[in-house]
Image (spheres, rainbow, N blue to C red):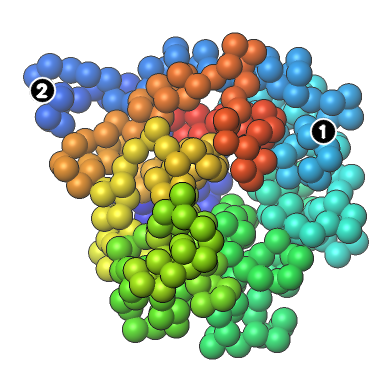
Amino acid sequence: MWRKHWATTLAGTLIVGFAVGPQLVAEDGSTGGTETRVGADPQLRQQLVNRSIRYLSEKGQADDGSYSAEAGPAITALVTSALIRSGRSLDDPLVAKSLEYLQGFVQPNGGIYAPNSLYRNYETCITMMCLIDANRDGRYQKLIDGAERFVKDLQNDEGEGYDPSHPYYGGGGYGKHRRPDLSNTGILIDALVAAGNGPDDPHLRKALIFVKRLQQHEDADTMLEIVKKNPDGGFIYATRGGGESQAVHDPSASKEENEQLNRERGLRSYASMTYMGLKSLIYAGLTEDDERVQAARAWIAKNYRLDANPGLGKNGLFYYYHTFAKTMNVLGDDYFVDAEGVRHDWRRELVEVLAAQQNEDGSWINEQQRWMEGDPNLVTAYALLALSYCD
C-alpha cells in the first residue's frame, strides 16, 4: 500500500498527506454491521487547528514574519509548512510574510541557513521542504534546486573523503563536526524525496547504508557490533563512538553506570528514531516484506503508545508525534495492530492526545524542555504538522 502512496507523493498530487474519506467500517473491520467512522473527529481536529493558528497569528509570529528568530530559519519554516498543510493559502499574510523572511537566508552556495550556522544541513532541508510545500506554481523551483544540490554535496560520501567502510558514510549531520545522526539523515531523506528523488537516486542509496547501520539487527552488513547485542529491530541515534543512543537503561544511574549497562546489554532503541528509521527504509526503497522493515514494525508493535516517546519518556514528545504521524501516513493503513493484537485507529488516538494537551491560547509546549521543546512555536509547529496527517 505504501508504494502507491509514495509514488503519489512524488508526483506532487498530495499536499497534506493521505486523506481519510467518509468510509465507514464495522468494529471488526468489515463493511457491514455496527458502523464507526475511521479516523479522527473532523470537527475536533479542525478546532485544534484553528486554535493553534490563532496562537501563531496573535502570539507566535514576529513583525518580520519569523518565529523564534534566535533559533535560525528552521522553526519559521516548520510553522509555515504546517500552515500551508493546514489549508492556508500562499497569499495569506501569515504565510506570505514568513516565506519572504525565509528567502533572506538563501546563500550563494544554494544552502538556506543562518550566517555562521552550525546546522546547515538541518536548516536547509527543513526550509527546502517548506518551499516545496509552497511551490504550487513553480515560483520557488530555482531555490529548491539550489538547496537540493547543496544538501547532496554536504552528505558524507566520496566527495567529502568518506568511503562506504566509514561509519559516517551516507549520513547527514548538523554541520558542526560532520558527525551524522539518524535525525538529520532522516530529514535529508525526507527533503530529497519531497524534491522528487526516487529509491534509485545515488544519494538516497548512500543514505540507506547509514540508516541500516543504526538498526539493532543481526544483519551481516551492520558494521556496529553493539547493535547485535540487542537486535530488537529498533533504531539508535548515531554511529559515532561505536554507536550512540539517546535512551539509557537506567535514568537514575550515573553516566558511567549506564555505559557499563550498554556494554553488557547493548544500546536501547527508542521510538522517535525507530519511526524515523522505518520511514527512511521505505523511502529508500525497501518493501514491506524486507526483514528490516518487518523488524522495525515489530518493535513499534511492541512499544506502541502515545502518552510518551517510548524509550525517552516525555523527552522529544512532540518531535515524536510528528514523526509518528508521518511514518504511519507512509505505511498507508487506517489501523495499526500492536503486539497484543489491538487495532489502533492512530489518527483518532493522536488527535485526542493532542486535544488533551493543547493550552488555552492554542499553543502546545512540552514540560520536558530538552531539544527546544520548551519553545511553544516549535512545539505548536510539530503538533500542527502531525494534525496535517490526520485529515
Question: In which quadrant of the rendered view does residue 110 lie?
Answer: bottom right
Query: Residue 172 location, x and y as percent?
Result: 64, 67
The image shows residue 339, relative to residue 377, as above or below, that is: below
Q: Which amino acid, by three-letter code, is at mark 1?
A: Ser
Element under label 2? loop
User: Residue 22 sits in which quadrant?
Assistant: top left
Image x and y of residue 236, in percent = 46, 62
Reading the image, the residue beneath label 1 is 66
Which residue, given by chain and number where applicable, does mark 2 sit on?
Answer: 32
Q: Decide: few, some or many residues near mark 2? Use Cα within 10 Å; few <14, some 14-19, many ≥20.
A: few
Of mark 2 and mark 1, the one earlier in the sequence is 2
Query: Within 10 angstroms of label 1, few (less than 14), some, or many (20 or more) residues?
Result: many
Tell me, yes or no, if residue 196 can be seen here.
no
Compared across the picture, whether 292 is left or right of 364 comes to left
| 211, 243: nearer the viewer | 243
Q: Residue at x 70, y 61 (%)?
A: 174
